[in-house]
Image: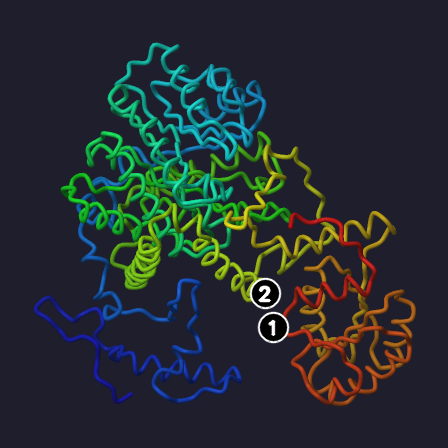
Amino acid sequence: MNMPESGTAGPEGPALGAGFPVATRERWRELVAGVLAKTGVDVDRSAHAPEELLASATYDGFTIGPLYTAEDADDQVQGGGFPGVAPFTRGRRPEGAVISGWDIRQQHLGPDPAATRTAVRADLENGVTSLWLVVGDEGVPAAGIGEALADVHLDLAPVVLEPGAGTDAAAAAAALLTAWSDRDIPDTAVSGNLGIDPVSRLARTGAPADAATATSDISEAARAAASHATRYPGLRLITVDGTPYHDAGGSDSQELGATMAAGVAYLRALTEAGLDLADAAARLEFRYAATADQFATIAKLRAARAMWARVTEVCGLPAEHRGMRQHAVTSAAMMTRRDPYVNTLRTTLACFGAGTGGADAVTVRPFDAALGLPDDFTRRIARNTQSLLLEEAHLARVIDPAGGSFFVERLTADLYAAGWAFFRELEAAGGMAAALTSGLVAERVDEVWRRRRDNLAHRNDPITGVSEFPNLDEPRVERAAAPGAATASSAPTALPRHRYAEDFEALRDRSDAHLDATGERPKAFLATLGPVAAHTARATFAANLLQAGGIEPVPGGDGVAEAVAAFRDSGTPIACLCSSDKVYAELAEDAAAALKEAGAERVLLAGKPAERYAAAGVDAFLFTGCDAHSLLVELHDVLGCTQEGGDR
């Protein structure tokens, strides 16, 4: 090719790129357009067409492109800097986690103190380095904290509390402090976090309902927290929790903005309670959700540190006090009850993102967490996930491994900008208490949830094992219900807990109820027309979609007459035509009419909508991007499945 070469010879010999054409964005566009054209995509040869066709929109208002170069990373978050140096984008500590790895923190929420004691001991003996104890209505009783921690060397293993929504945080804190004093732990050696967090309680419950009372509650909690500061210099007092906004279906930038606003609220309250600003900032720990989108997780943690560095800089803190202590926990919203073993893949990716993103502590939820109380085996898998990534994959050996990646730097900057905009909106509304009680936060988060839910319904955001590649014959995994799992606030400003799989899993529950009541699952007939090579692809697609709703596909046919005969024997009022466009042109209209005459209440066609087939009797079309959930709900209604089941 008559093109300039990308390298030239130097004093030490030819450059590595010598002999290759110069890589330019324009040349890349030409090549991408050519590949897309070969796939049948109608490509506009304008300069930006390939990017537009391959780009994906985020819930944060910006677009993820298919290619990033040095040009995209020019506007890094406040220059990026070095690890351990403000703005801490690259990590809070200069050494990262190289020396000891990140803190492996296991969550415990069992209501039985004796059982929790056994589980805690097993965790600490097998790699866990700190404990996250859920207390009260959603976990172990406050009075049982001492028993649950009876075997713990509290001078070695930090304990982090999370008082449940209806729990007296002061009582929980007193019980933990008593456990420390009963072991004669020196006050200077006490480490962990009392987990005081009235903002998250307000977010989850919607109570109190007015900003003045909410602000008063935050101030009262801060005074209670500050009362322990002098005696316990190494104890963190408050958790700034971003997971309520994530669990409600919110975006990464909303999680970032909300935690910044909550952090500012706590700084104000703690300094009013008598702490100096540096001490107040040091008593906070921020908690973020880590998802299977590893790059988004990495960028979110990096952006959070840079945002907090900017917040504390504006507050007047010197650079050495602007670092953020981060705890990342694998997302509860991404966990599934169906095919729960796939959750192991999700949590591994999330853990990878959290660790390489610079989290100080990481919690991996057991793969059965969405089903109820995890058992010994699943807790073992959860902690071993972290041990393998640390001890065998050596993830902590590199400080900020994503640093310098054009994509990650751009994503970090975009999340920073979107999160900062939401933070400013919350502050302009009067601060976090006012934004929560007015319903502003709930409204903004719900806007994102509606868009996310629509994408889930159309399978644009596929869920492996649920909306894609479901297994109707999977054995049911049963677990004891977790404390507080069935409770939900009815307050209009409360943030609900969602799981991305919940709508499809509700359909699977309806299918299970139908199976229990009738001895068989709801069924749909697949009228496979023409030779195997013609119908296999679309029959597979249709079967996958139907099974996502718990509907069993029953294939049969060849010609129209054979398909109609097989349909009559199938015992279902739903039929779906499956074949190639060429076969459809010859047989689809006759087949649709014949199936309707044979008693089909719904005739579907696996393929793009076409008016001629709709006129012949086709009621709906199955294609990539169709509203699969709405279609499946309609089919369940036609098949007479009950409305029971689900966790909606």
492 relative to 539 in the view: left or right: left
The residue lying furthest to the left in this view is 11
Of helix, strand and loop, which one carries label 1? loop
90 relative to 502 in the view: left or right: left
Residue ID for mark 2: 459
198 relative to 563 in the view: left or right: left
Q: How many marks?
A: 2
Above or below for 429 versus 593: above
The residue shown at (72%, 48%) is: 645
Residue 233: where, in percent of width, then height? 25, 24
For the residues labelled 2 and 1, say whether their Cβ atoms are less than 8 Å apart: yes
Above or below for 522 versus 497: below
The residue shown at (30%, 23%) is: 227
Instruction: Please state which of residues 199 and 176 is positioned toward the viewer in this rendering.
Output: 199
Instruction: Please state which of residues 194 and 554 is positioned toward the viewer in this rendering.
Output: 194
CA–CA distance in space, label 2 to label 1: 8 Å
Residue density around tag 2, few if under 14, some if 14–19, many if 20 or more, within 10 Å: some
Residue 533: where, in percent of width, then height? 71, 77
Residue ID for mark 1: 624
The kind of residue tagged 2 is: Arg
Quarter of the image with the N terminus is bottom left
Residue 259: where, in percent of width, then height? 36, 47
Name the colouring of the figure. Answer: rainbow
Instruction: Please state which of residues 94 and 169 is positioned toward the viewer in this rendering.
Output: 169
